[in-house]
Structures are given as C-alpha cells and as structure tokens.
Image: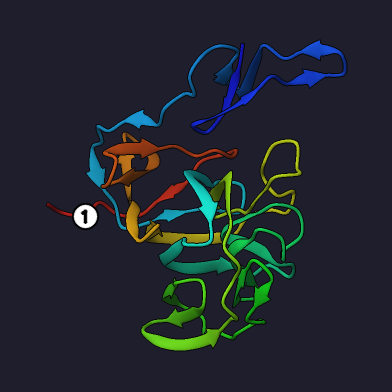
C-alpha cells in the first residue's frame, strides 16, 4: 500500500506505530493508501479576472517539483508589507540555503535565494511589479535588480508554493510563516527549460482560482479563507 505527495509515491506513513490510511486538507481528502493523488479541479470557469488578492492565508500549491532549473515570472502587487521574510514563490528543504529555489518578500523588498546563493534584499517601490529570475539573475520590470552565484544542481519531489513558501520538514509541507498579502495578476514557472505552469486568475461563481493554460486545470486555494476577486476581464 502507498500514498502520494503530489504525483510522487512516498510509500507508507505512520503516526507512532499506527499506519495512516488517509490525509485531508481541511475537509477534502487529498491522499489515501493505495490511491492516486487528487488532481487539480477540471477546468471550467465563468470569467478570467484581473487578479486574485490574498491576505497571507490564501495560497496555491503549484504541484511543480523543485529543482535547480526552475525559472519564475510573477506579476504582483503588495497589499500589506510583512516584517519577516516570507515566500512569494518558494520551496526549501530545511534552511533557506538548502535545496532552495525561492523569491522572498520582506517590507516590500525582494530577494532571490537559490540553493545557498542569496542576492540579499533589494528595494522595490510600492506598486505593481513583474519579477523574473532564471536562478542567477533577478529582474524587476525588465531591469536587472540583482545577481546570485550559480546554484548547484539538485532535484527534489517537494513542490513549489505560490503566495506562501513550502518547507519539507514542516508537518503540513507549508512554511509556518504567514504568506504574502498581495494581488496576483499572473505567474509562469519553467522547469528543465519547458513552460510548466502559466497561471491566470479566474472565478467560478464568486470563488477564485488560478487557471493553468499549460495543463488546462484549475488550482484552488490550499489555505483558509477566500481570495478577493478582481474585476472580470472582457473577452
């Protein structure tokens, strides 16, 4: 018998001497022994919208495994600054410098950490920004903001969190620090040089999701509460 983390079979899990049969995210069953992982919601939606707004407690599991080839492009605007660093797009095994691929936010500043190489904090003016990185260069709005040393190669089954960091040694997989309070307009993730996710905000009724143009699936809030929705985008 086995259970899954994302799409990766991880064998058996125990609580003390008791074998775990099922795992839930809130009231939703996400894993079961011998079963397959629950896939993202099949894609039907009412409208593409301008943005999804999160207060730090709504976030997305991208289901993209972390590795040293990951590249990001994220279009966002900070709603409320946070005084401690928190992941905008990130996964780390344990410490920030271990098997890490992350864009961090703190007091409106931004930093890139990539498996031991850190750019340090770089200041961005308030407002909307398009931040991109290939793991070495960090760009904001088309301008080179910082450079990190080339990271060592690695791959790991832990998946990347969006709007809140993920951390393998936390029991839930999510970093215990609260996520980023932002408006998210779009996000692209590349892995092995291939576009793995192209997220745009959409709504189903009054519930917000990210629609992935690559897989054709909807990705739901993995946190608590609800996203605040931007205006509909006319077709």
Q: Mark 1 packing: few (<14 Cα in 10 Å), some, or many (20+)? A: few
Q: Give the residue displayed 78% in from the left and 19% down from the top.
A: 14
Residue 117 picture location, percent across and down: 65, 75
Residue 221 picture location, percent across and down: 49, 39
Q: Which residue lies furthest to the right in this view?
A: 16
Q: Quadrant of residue 225?
A: top right
Q: Which residue lies furthest to the left in this view?
A: 235
Classify 86 as above or below 177: below
Horizontal relation, residue 189 to residue 168: left or right: left
> On the rendered image, what quadrant is the N terminus found in?
top right
Colouring of the image: rainbow
Residue 224 picture location, percent across and down: 60, 38
Kindly tell me whether residue 162 is visible in this rendering: no
Mark 1 highlights which residue?
Answer: 233
Kindly tell me whether residue 183 is visible in this rendering: yes
Classify 160 as above or below 96: above
Q: Give the residue displayed 48% in from the left and 19% down from the top.
A: 36
Nearer-the-camera pick, 41 or 173 = 173
| Helix, strand or loop under label 1 | loop
Horizontal relation, residue 210 to residue 57: left or right: left
Residue 76 picture location, percent across and down: 44, 67
Nearer-the-camera pick, 64 or 180 = 64
Q: In which quarter of the image is residue 74?
A: bottom left
Horizontal relation, residue 32 to residue 206: left or right: right
Q: Give the residue displayed 58% in from the left and 40% down from the top.
A: 223
């Amino acid at each position: 018998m086995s259970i899954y983390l994302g799409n990766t079979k991880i064998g058996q899990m125990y609580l003390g001497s008791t074998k775990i049969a099922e795992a839930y995210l809130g009231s939703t069953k996400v894993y079961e022994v011998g079963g397959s992982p629950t896939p993202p919601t099949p894609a039907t939606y009412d409208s593409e919208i301008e943005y999804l707004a999160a207060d730090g407690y709504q976030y997305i599991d991208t289901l993209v495994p972390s590795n040293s080839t990951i590249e990001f492009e994220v279009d966002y605007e900070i709603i409320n600054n946070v005084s401690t660093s928190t992941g905008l797009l990130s996964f780390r095994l344990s410490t920030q410098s271990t098997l890490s691929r992350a864009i961090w936010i703190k007091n409106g500043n931004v930093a890139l950490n990539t498996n031991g190489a850190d750019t340090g904090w770089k200041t961005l003016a308030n407002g909307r920004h398009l931040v991109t990185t290939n793991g070495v260069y960090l760009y904001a709005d088309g301008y080179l903001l910082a450079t990190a040393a080339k990271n060592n190669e690695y791959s790991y089954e832990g998946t990347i969190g969006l709007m809140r960091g993920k951390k393998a040694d936390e029991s839930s997989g999510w970093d215990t620090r609260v996520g980023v309070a932002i408006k998210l307009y779009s996000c692209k993730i590349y892995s092995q040089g291939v576009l793995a996710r192209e997220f745009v905000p959409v709504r189903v009724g009054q519930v917000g999701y990210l629609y992935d143009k690559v897989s054709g699936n909807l990705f739901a809030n993995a946190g608590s509460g609800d996203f605040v929705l931007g205006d509909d985008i006319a077709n």
